[in-house]
Image (cartoon, rainbow, N blue to C red):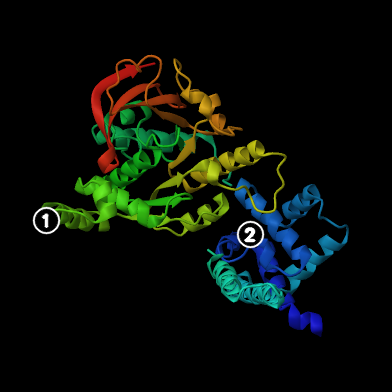
């Protein structure tokens, strides 16, 4: 009885969640934002949840047979206990339709356990003779705040059917007068090269810190949302939503970001700021600044977004791999993240624009950035459909670039040409504009 009192949990609710997933894997999307494996009290349930999570991230087939096989691969399968347990859960779970209610109970019990554990830690700290009350209170506030804020395959088709869709798409483009096949980026020369931001494409913008990849991503996101009316979801793992919105305001209003930071604006600047805020407020852009979010979480979130047009991630190397999955090194983990991003783009059928950092090697004088300069590159260069390098200049252009010019190099384009584009960096407004220059590779 003491153990049950000190460790709140509901075996029935946990079984309801797992049983629902076994009955219908599609309902896993309904709980992926509510639960992690750590929310389960029973270790077997944690193992099953982690296995399904990894399969969901990889975009593979999920059913009782493949889950059992996944558990074998992870070394958490027990014969015949696991198979018998699966059969029992599928038999005893009334319906997968109630999975969110089951998940809410599991989450509630998990929070209670965390509260009890944290209370024990705080009690131990307060009992130490040399402890200071203020520091104990600060620690308690931080720990409890952490608890509160912690939550946040297609069938085979015969070629005639596929060709029919392709021809219909080409015909629609022809009738539209040469409309871009993808969303407009706002950079005409870039759109000419890559065809715009094409559905299911994984597009990478890479640079060294401070060159402007976040600003370029924001510029592109705002343009795509403005001219298509489709929703752009922006996941920021580094900057807060307020910081991103401030940059967009600066760019849209033509007001110095430094003036916004200090609040020192002229009357005319206040007018432009108000007009810009009104314009931006109408754009279908949604921000998520959860630094701990994973690709499966992103995918589950975006599935619920109406009229989804594009996903932006800033930036790739700050992300973590699939929870519960072991990696030999960070390069392998980033490679797994990269593959998951590509799978997400394909499954949701929208372009995913992802920022990434280049290594220090790319700063060496006299050479252009290379794909091998991608930090912890792993399989990024092979997963991405388009790779863009934002740099102060390559060996071909360094001597001719003005102080405020930046080169956008299309280093990889799976569906078209490569080359370089010059952009003017207006740093005070955190925005880019095109220059009358272009170099074909």
Quarter of image, res 31: bottom right
Question: Which circle's residue, 1 or 2, is located before the other in the chain?
Answer: 2
**Quadrant position of residue 35:** bottom right
Q: Quadrant of residue 6?
A: bottom right
For marks 1 and 2, give the CA distance. 57 Å
- Residue at 68% across, 62% down: 37
Q: Is residue 138 above or below residue 256?
A: below
Q: Is residue 72 left or right of residue 213?
A: right
The one nearer the camera, 81 or 156, is 81
Give the residue at mark 2.
Answer: 25
Pick whichever, 57 or 161, lies toward us: 57
Q: Determine whether the residue tagged by mark 1 lies in a helix, strand or loop.
A: helix
Outermost left residue: 268
Q: Residue at x 61, y 33 (%)?
A: 378
Residue under the point 56% across and 46% down = 154
> Where is residue 300 drawn, in percent x and y?
52, 57
- For the residue labelled by badge 2, is the local secondary structure a helix, a strand or a loop? helix
Above or below residue 170? Residue 156 is: below
- Using residue 236 as the reference point, say whether residue 181 is left or right of it: left
Foreground of the two, 84 or 232: 232
The mark closer to the camera, 1 or 2, is 1
Q: Which mark is residue 440?
A: none
Q: Where is residue 144? Give x, y as percent.
A: 58, 72
> Which residue shows up at 46% across the image and 16% down it?
367
Give the total number of marks visible in the rendering: 2
Residue 307 in sight here:
no
Q: Left or right: where does residue 46 sit relative to residue 136?
A: right
Residue located beneath label 1 in the image: 267
User: Residue placed farthest to the front in the image?
Assistant: 130
Position of residue 172 in the picture relative to residue 364 (left or right): left
The percent position of residue 120, horizontal first and vertical second, equals: 70, 76
């Amino acid at each position: 009885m003491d153990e049950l009192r000190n460790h709140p949990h509901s075996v029935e609710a946990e079984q309801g969640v797992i049983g629902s997933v076994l009955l219908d894997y599609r309902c896993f999307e309904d709980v992926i934002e509510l639960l992690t494996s750590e929310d389960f009290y029973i270790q077997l349930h944690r193992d099953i949840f982690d296995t399904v999570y990894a399969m969901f991230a990889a975009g593979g087939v999920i059913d009782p047979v493949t889950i059992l096989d996944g558990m074998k691969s992870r070394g958490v399968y027990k014969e015949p206990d696991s198979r018998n347990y699966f059969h029992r859960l599928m038999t005893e779970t009334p319906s997968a339709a109630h999975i969110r209610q089951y998940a809410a109970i599991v989450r509630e019990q998990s929070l209670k356990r965390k509260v009890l554990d944290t209370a024990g830690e705080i009690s131990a700290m307060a009992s130490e003779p040399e402890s200071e009350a203020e520091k104990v209170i600060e620690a308690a506030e931080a720990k409890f705040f952490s608890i509160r804020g912690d939550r946040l395959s297609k069938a085979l088709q015969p070629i005639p059917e596929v060709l029919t869709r392709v021809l219909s798409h080409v015909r629609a483009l022809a009738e539209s007068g040469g409309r871009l096949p993808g969303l407009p980026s706002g950079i005409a020369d870039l759109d000419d090269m890559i065809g715009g931001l094409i559905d299911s494409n994984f597009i990478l913008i890479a640079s060294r810190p401070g060159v402007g990849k976040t600003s370029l991503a924001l510029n592109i996101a705002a343009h795509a949302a403005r001219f298509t009316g489709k929703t752009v979801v922006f996941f920021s793992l580094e900057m807060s939503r307020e910081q991103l919105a401030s940059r967009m305001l600066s760019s849209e209003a033509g007001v110095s970001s430094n003036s916004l930071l200090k609040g020192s604006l002229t009357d005319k600047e206040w007018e432009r700021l108000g007009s810009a805020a009104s314009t931006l407020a109408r754009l279908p852009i949604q921000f998520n600044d959860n630094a701990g979010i994973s690709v499966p979480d992103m995918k589950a979130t975006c599935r619920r977004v109406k009229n989804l047009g594009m996903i932006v991630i800033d930036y790739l190397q700050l992300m973590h791999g699939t929870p519960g999955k072991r990696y030999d090194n960070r390069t392998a983990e980033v490679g797994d993240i990269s593959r998951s991003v590509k799978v997400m783009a394909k499954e949701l059928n929208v372009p995913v624009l992802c920022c990434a950092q280049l290594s220090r090697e790319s700063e060496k004088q006299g050479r252009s950035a290379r794909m091998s300069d991608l930090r912890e590159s792993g399989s990024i260069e092979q997963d991405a459909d388009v790779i863009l390098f934002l740099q102060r200049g390559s060996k071909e252009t360094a001597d001719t670039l003005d102080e405020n010019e930046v080169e956008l190099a299309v280093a990889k384009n799976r569906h078209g040409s490569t080359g370089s584009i010059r952009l003017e960096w207006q740093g005070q407004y955190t925005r880019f504009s095109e220059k009358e220059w272009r170099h074909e590779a």
